[in-house]
Image (cartoon, helix red, strand yellow):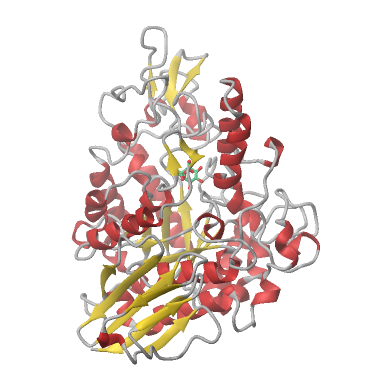
Amino acid sequence: MTPQHDPPWWQSAVVYQIYPRSFADADGDGIGDLRGIIGRLDHLAALGVDVLWLSPIYPSPQVDNGYDISDYRDVDPLFGTLADFDALLAEVHDRGMKLVMDLVVNHTSDEHPWFVESRSSRDSPKRDWYIWRDTRDGAEPNNWGSLFSGSAWEWDEATEQYYLHLFDRKQPDLNWEHPPVRKAVQDIMSWWLDRGVDGFRMDVINFISKTSGLPDAPAIPGRRFVVAFAEFADGPRVHDYLAETTLAVFGNRAGDFMTVGEMPGVTPEQARLYTDPERGELDMVFQFEHVSVDHGAGGKFDYRGLDLVVLKKALHRWQAALADTGWNSLYWNNHDQPRVVSRFGDDDPAYWAASAKALATILHGMRGTPFVYQGEELGMTNYPFRTPQDHADLEAVNHYDDVVAASGDAQAALAGLAAMSRDNARTPMQWDGGPNGGFSAGTPWLPVNPNHTWLNAEEQVGTTDSVFAHYRDLIRLRHDLPILRDGVFTPLLEDDPQLWVYTRTLPERELLVVANCGREPRSMEICPDWIGSALLLGNLLGTPTTSTSAILDLVGWDARIYSRDS
Ligand code: TEU
């Protein structure tokens, strides 16, 4: 039997996120599917990842690409069948990997039978499953805005009340205060665990408890609706709900599984509570501070570019906050974020590979569980979006329509979308240089990035100095070196606008991670203890295998991990 105090398995694991719609299309309809994933599992085994997280595959009207679920216990025919799912799970387990599901239970689709029943009449037994309110002075019940533009309330003509939707109007929020809702969620989770899955990524799970009375958010001049994070994120009963769910679903088997809660707006103080193992809520959370550093005052599409010091401090704050209690997730990318090599790196062909590897080195050297989003291991870049019609995502389309309706600057809006649109992450996986990048024999639902002719898996897997090889090496280090799990994180040169430097320390060993986050060469003085230490991993060919002097000369986007016994 494993002693209780052993570190949980997911602290030395690396997770890989699959966005099924864009990963691999086996049936040629232009949309990825479960059979497609099965056909590409060897790519993931070669990369060495431990856990696969599948973005939603459940039946859905697909207004938000499956984050609007109409049946929690089946597979959307777009992606296959439950039998395909069972086959996928078996193949994943055969390769020694695990699989976690995306659980979207802050809201359902408005086409879910629960909501259909709920809206059928004010007396419906399911009325209280959602959040219904009367008008206030003939208008919306409060000033909350949807994260996808406009009001967070939708008027229901038939029953003459509004329902709350923090996202699209086709994503009504569930009422977690109503005990049968919580029981229904637990039953869904148990159903998937019985099928053999290894855990859950829980969508916007810090939004499930709203401030009682649903008060107005402080007004913002010039805005009718306000995205009221303070009123719905980390609300009064969220910790109770999570502890109750975890206990009911996992009981004393929690250690076998992995849970990660997606939490826009979460503070480090809250995250310590969510991830304190003593409290039995979640294993880790996705925080958003480091992926919000380039947002201007007008929001994410008011993109203002990168300040490296701000980015460093955001991530360092989280390293410090969860050093003693709780656990960090580490991510640059997911299906909601632009591609990191274009965003914080340099996707000019001269620096593309080095900067993709440097950013990977920085993230994977930190304390926490790293997440790799599909295509990140190849250094996939943002898409060259130009016209409004290029965008498929409802967030982008709504934003553009809002700007045009307000007769704002449409050109600036397009530039913001090009930099920040979620579609940047959602273009198909680039498997090879052939038609549609090897993603589909049909017409892909979003175009494949034209750079697939040279940026693709076939070029990189098996090539020693590829971005893929670098990710594979980082993942191997994570498995081999307990210091990457346990070592104390200490930032250095925090105010340097170009160098990213930190150490990881255990009593017997120390790692030094250095990265030059820019094109210009930089020299850096290291303390004498580090002279003669071994290069564990570098991102450029020809870096000397030991640090021979007190000065490290770093070329553009040079990144290195040194190791020494202490
Ligand atoms: O995202 C939650 C969320 O608030 C953001 O990531 C959001 O998508 C974006 O940043 C708005 O600017 C989760 C899912 O990851 C996302 O795909 C869904 O659209 C959303 O919840 C609703 O389920």
Q: Residue 553 occupies which quadrant of the picture?
A: bottom left
Residue 384 appears anywhere in the view: yes
- Image quarter (top left, top right, bottom left or bottom right) of the N terminus: bottom left
Residue 177 appears anywhere in the view: no
Q: Residue 528 occupies which quadrant of the picture?
A: bottom left
Establish if 470 lies above or below 212. below
User: Which residue is the extreme one toward the top?
Assistant: 137
Question: Front-most of 185 and 398?
Answer: 398
Establish if 286 lies above or below 468. above
Question: Front-most of 242 and 387?
Answer: 387
- Residue at point 56% right, 57% down? 342
Establish if 267 lies above or below 209. below
Pinpoint residue 361: horizontal percent, then vertical percent: 44, 72
Pinpoint residue 374: horizontal percent, then vertical percent: 57, 62
- Residue at point 25% right, 28% down? 212
Establish if 130 lies above or below 457. above
Pinpoint residue 505: horizontal percent, then vertical percent: 25, 78
Count of labels shown?
A: 0
- Residue at point 34% right, 92% down? 532
Question: Front-most of 315 and 9?
Answer: 315
